[in-house]
Image (cartoon, rainbow, N blue to C red):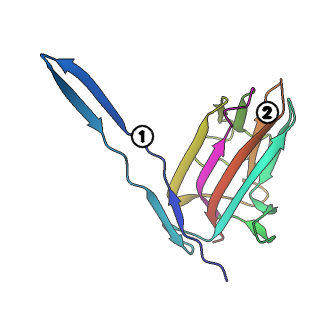
């Protein structure tokens, strides 16, 4: 039996400083708290972790089947019932854009408004989304997360998925 402990860290912090009348006025934007996901299933829990560095040739795409085709680090086939956290990164060294979402059929909608929505990750961009409740994955009808590479060059992108089996 495995145990999964997850810490999702996606925060913006900033310090805005302006010199006025011989002194600095500072406006600090604090970091947000990390999202902690405990081991198990249900609200705020996860029991499946998937991470891979995947390569797409120029002008190609792939469908990540979230219900039954991905394998975890231990070689077991994984089936998400709920996806709790997504991280996809187009590396800084990339020269092409990645499009995430909008699969042709059986689209995993997850954090998107509808099945035709997608995000574009330019070189150096990273997309992180987290839901303690989780986004429903429905085998055979709502389980495909599409990742498409634009024309110009191959890209090796990183994908991390955290979810629950029930």
Q: Measured from the top left, where is residue 166 in percent x and y?
A: 63, 72
**Quadrant of residue 102 in the image?**
top right
1 and 2 marks in contact (CB < 8 Å): no
Stretch of the chain drawn in magenta: 82-95
Q: Is residue 85 magenta?
A: yes
Q: Is residue 137 magenta?
A: no
For the point 86% across and 30% down, the residue is 58
For the point 48% across and 47% down, the residue is 10
Residue that numbered label 2 is attached to: 149
Q: Measured from the top left, where is residue 143 in percent x and y?
A: 74, 54
Q: Nearer the viewer, residue 3 or 18?
A: 18
Q: Measured from the top left, where is residue 154 in percent x and y?
A: 84, 33
Q: Is the N terminus in the top left, top right, bottom left or bottom right quadrant? A: bottom right
**Quadrant of residue 151 in the image?**
top right
Tell which circle, 1 or 2, labels the residue nearer the N-terminal end.
1
Q: Nearer the viewer, residue 16 or 127?
A: 16
Residue that numbered label 1 is attached to: 12
The residue tagged with tag 2: helix, strand or loop? strand
């Amino acid at each position: 039996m495995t145990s999964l402990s997850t810490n999702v860290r996606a925060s913006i912090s900033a310090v805005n400083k302006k010199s006025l009348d011989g002194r600095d006025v500072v406006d600090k934007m604090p970091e947000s708290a990390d999202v902690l996901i405990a081991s198990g299933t249900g609200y705020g829990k996860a029991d499946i972790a998937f991470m891979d560095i995947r390569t797409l040739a120029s002008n190609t795409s792939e469908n990540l089947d979230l219900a039954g085709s991905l394998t975890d680090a231990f070689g077991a086939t994984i089936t998400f019932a709920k996806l709790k956290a997504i991280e996809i990164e187009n590396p800084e060294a990339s020269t092409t854009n990645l499009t995430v979402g909008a699969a042709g059929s059986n689209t995993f909608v997850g954090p998107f408004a509808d099945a035709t929505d997608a995000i574009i990750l330019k070189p150096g961009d990273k997309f992180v989304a987290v839901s303690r409740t989780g986004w429903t994955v429905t085998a055979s009808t709502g389980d495909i997360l599409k990742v498409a590479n634009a024309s110009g060059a191959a890209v090796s992108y990183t994908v991390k998925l955290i979810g629950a089996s029930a």
